[in-house]
Amino acid sequence: MNDSAKPDAISVIVIVKNEAHDIRDCLASVHGWVDEIVVLDSGSTDGTQAICREFGATVVETDWPGFGPQKQRALDTARGPWILSLDADERVSPALRDEILASVKANGADLFRVPRQSNYCGKWIRHSGWSPDYVTRLFRRDVARFSNDLVHERVIAAPEARVGTLAQALIHYSFRDFSEVLGKIDSYSTYGATQGAARGKRGGLRKALLHGFWSFVRSWIIQRGFLDGKMGFVLAISNAEGTYYRYLKLMLLETQQSGAAKARDAAPESR
C-alpha cells in the first residue's frame, strides 16, 4: 500500500476460488488508482493466485467459511480507511472510478450505495429486480462490517454512518452460461437451506411450491421481467428454481435431523 495514513486511501477486497476467467478484468479495472488490493483465495487451482499477484495484490490463502465471514476476513486484512468490495465478476468503469475518487475526497458520506448493471448469459437485464440493483460496496472501514450470512451477505453500518448514493453503475457479468446458472442454483440453495435451518426456519413441499411460484411472479410480473424478453422469463424461472430447491433442501435437513435425534433416543444407554 502506498500510504496507509492517507485519509482517502482505498483498499479493494475480493474473495475468490477458481476465478481465472474473471479476475484479470476485475483487477485491471482498479489497478493503478487504488492504494491496495487484498484477495482472499479459498483453494484455487486454475492460476487465479498468479493472476492476482500480477496486479500487486496481497493474496491470502484460507478455508471457506461462507460469503459473509470470508468478506469480513478480507476487510480485517485490508489497511486502508476506505474499502471497495468487489466480486471477481464485477468491473469498475472509468466513469465510476472518477466518481469513487471524488466521493472519498469529498468526505460527504461514510458509505455509498452503488447501482449495479448485470449481464445474464449475454443479455443486459434492465428490469426483473436487477436494475437498478443498489449494493453497498464503498465504505469507511471504521463504520461498517459484513454480516455472518453464508450467502447473500450484507454490509452492516453503524447507526451514525452517513449514507450516500453513487450515480455510475458497477458492471456485473453475473452468469456466463446456463451451466453456471445451474451450479449457483445448487450451491446457493444449499447455503440458504443451511442458514435457514440454523435460524429455525421450516421447509416443506408446500412452502417450496408457494415460495417458488411467488418468486417467479415477483420477478416476471411485479418487477417487470417481461420487459427483458425471453431472458427475463428464463431469469424468473431460475429465481423460482433457486427458491424451490432451498425449501426442499431445508425439508430434507429437517428430516435428517429428526432421524438423527430419534436414533440417539433409541440407542441403549452405555453403562
Image (cartoon, rainbow, N blue to C red):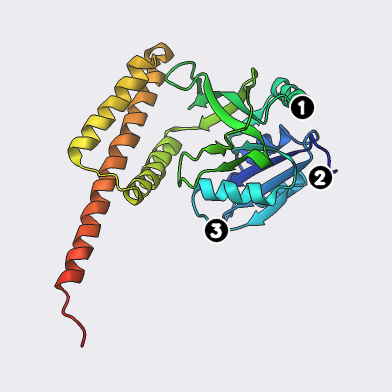
Which mark is nearer the camera, 2 or 3? 2
Mark 2 surroundings within 10 Å by alpha-carbon count, few (fewer than 14), some (14 through 19), many (20 or more) = some
Mark 1 lies on a secondary structure that is: helix
Q: Are marks 1 and 2 in contact (CB under 8 Å)?
A: no
Residue 102 position (above or below residue 25):
above
Residue ranking furthest to the top: 227
The residue beneath circle 2 is 4
Residue 264: x and y in percent read 20, 70
Image vertical order of residue 25 relative to residue 218, above or below: below
Q: Mark 3 = which residue? A: 63
- In the picture of the structure, the residue carrying the numbered disc 1 is 101
Please report contact status of discs 2 and 3: CB closer than 8 Å, yes or no: no
Type of the residue with mark 3: Asp
Q: Which residue is painted at 83% across and 43% down in the image?
A: 5
Q: Amino acid at mark 2?
A: Ser
- Residue 207 image point, x, y percent: 22, 36
- Front-most of residues 106 and 202: 106
Image height check: is 239 above or below 144? Answer: above
Q: Residues within 10 Å of mark 1 (few under 14, many from 20)?
A: some
Q: Position of residue 14 (x, y in %)?
A: 63, 43
Q: Look at the image and tell me whether residue 157 can be seen.
A: yes
How far is mark 1 from mark 2, CA to CA?
16 Å
Residue pictured at 79% horizontal, 40% vertical: 35
Whether residue 176 sits left or right of residue 204 in the image: it is: right
Residue at 42% of width from left, 33% of height from top? 178
Marked residue nearer the N-terminal end (1 or 2):
2
